[in-house]
Amino acid sequence: MTDYQPGLEGVPATRSRISYLDGKQGVLTYRGYRIVDLAEYSTFEETAYLLLDGELPSAAQLQRFDTLLREHRRVKYNIHDIMKSLPVTGHPMEMLQTAVASLGMFYPAHVPVQIRSPGDETEQYIYGQSIRILARMATLVAMWQQLRLGNYPMRQRSDLSYAANFLYMFNGVEPAPLVARIMDICFILHAEHTINASTFAAMVSGSTLASPSYVIAAAIGTLAGPLHGGANERVIAMLEEIGTPENVKPWLEKKLAAKETIWGMGHREYKVKDPRATLLQKLMRELADSQGAISPLFETALALEEACEETLAPKGVYPNVDYYSGILYREIGIPTDQFTSIFAIARTAGWLAHWREQVAENRIFRPTQIYTGSVPRDYVPLAGRQSG
Ligand code: COA
């Protein structure tokens, strides 16, 4: 038995074949394939297949998978009705958790037993459910965007890729090819990241053999916090507060002296720059070049990263995935409060892959604790207690 580790830091919670990260070298792989190569050559559909299945698909396998994803984009009108009754002032992640949890009521799923042999009924069930949930995630986020603007949700387009259809339904217009490809790469980069808090939540829920809508709803709730998926929203607020590159140094000195968090900086695992941050920064540069102008937020972010080199880099604190993702989303017209929902769409592929892996060799999570409370004591009736 090891000593207690706050936050379970460094404590293995499972064996997994899905992804690997080397925080000292800044390397991230999905099923052995480097994230840099997947961002360059793959698509989100292919990456999702890879995560779920373990191998890159053949052309025929990819076509079947993609066709199923396209076929399952639509959600029932009842879900539309539930969403319509939610307050438009609510956070999109709260809507998403509610909508995903409700999928279980409209698309009942039998509780899976453990996988006994490859391709058995349970494995087929998990595959089918994974496609349905993944296909609908983008629809739910996009529907909410239109509903809260007072519009009727756009009909899904089965002639568009996952990323392009999402942007079409979200904004109501078909995206330019570069913007669709940027969204596709963002989905790839956010699809999986070993055993982080939300994935662990999905695994714990999955280990009870809860049905997948519970599993994904648990993960969504965990992703919502600012120390996890919510950080890129804070990055935008932070950059807006700084205003211009000239203000960076005095602003940073003040924040660090007050021991405040610099959002989008630092990671429990990476002690060098997160490779996803490097890729997102490159995409941001490509977008700026295509527009012939660099956005003020991006300029401020570059200046802040440079200033943090002197102060935070010696502690192994560098930009993480959230540092540049928000700026990129902002540039392609996504409102700040939808950033984490977009993260959730992509990460659903990874959550589902871990759910499948968990169920395949399941043992319910039941850790122990170090009790620090009172020794057994006698119950004191209300009349005998001190007033307070
Ligand atoms: N801003 C300022 N200082 C930071 C920092 C940040 N974002 N991240 C880490 N540090 C400092 C810590 O204060 C600590 O300094 P000290 O040694 O002088 O006390 C040192 O770096 C080590 O950090 P530690 O708190 O041990 O790192 P962690 O692994 O517990 O925390 C995070 C990791 C992600 C929780 C943390 O870096 C953080 O809060 N980052 C901002 C939130 C964010 O962007 N989250 C998205 C992650 S993908």
Image: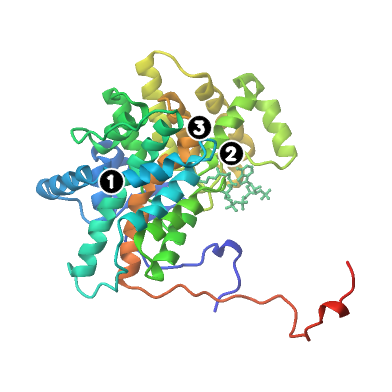
Q: Position of residue 129 (x, y in %)?
A: 27, 57
Q: Residue at x 45, y 67 (%)?
A: 13
Image spot of residue 125 (x, y percent): 23, 63
Q: Position of residue 187 (x, y in %)?
A: 35, 40
- What numbered label is drawn on residue 365? none
* Alpha carbon separation for disc pair 2 and 1: 31 Å
**Badge 3 or badge 2: first in the primary sequence:** 2
- Relative to residue 143, is residue 68 drawn left or right? left
* Viewer-nearest residue: 95 or 346: 95
Is 259 positioned to the left or the right of 118 in the image? right
In the rendered image, which residue does mark 3 sit on? Answer: 336
Residue at mark 2: C-beta within 8 A of ligand 1: yes
Tell which circle, 3 or 1, labels the residue nearer the N-terminal end.
Answer: 1
Q: Which residue is mark 2?
A: 263
- Name the spot of residue 12 as percent of width and height, x first: 46, 67
**Circle 2: is it few (<14), some (14-19), or many (20+) Cα within 10 Å?**
many
- Going by the numbered disc 3, the residue's amino acid type is Thr
Q: Are marks 2 and 1 in contact (CB under 8 Å)?
A: no
Question: Can residue 50 be seen?
Answer: yes
| CB atoms of marks 3 and 1 within 8 Å | no
Q: Residue at x 49, y 50 (%)?
A: 223
Task: Name the residue beneath numbered marker 1.
Answer: 135
Residue drawn at point x = 33 percent, y = 51 percent? 349
* Disc nearer the start of the sequence (2/1): 1
> Alpha carbon of mark 3 to alpha carbon of mark 2: how far?
14 Å
- Quadrant location, the N terminus: bottom right
In this rendering, does residue 21 appear at all?
A: no
Q: Is 118 left or right of 232, judged from the image as shown?
A: left
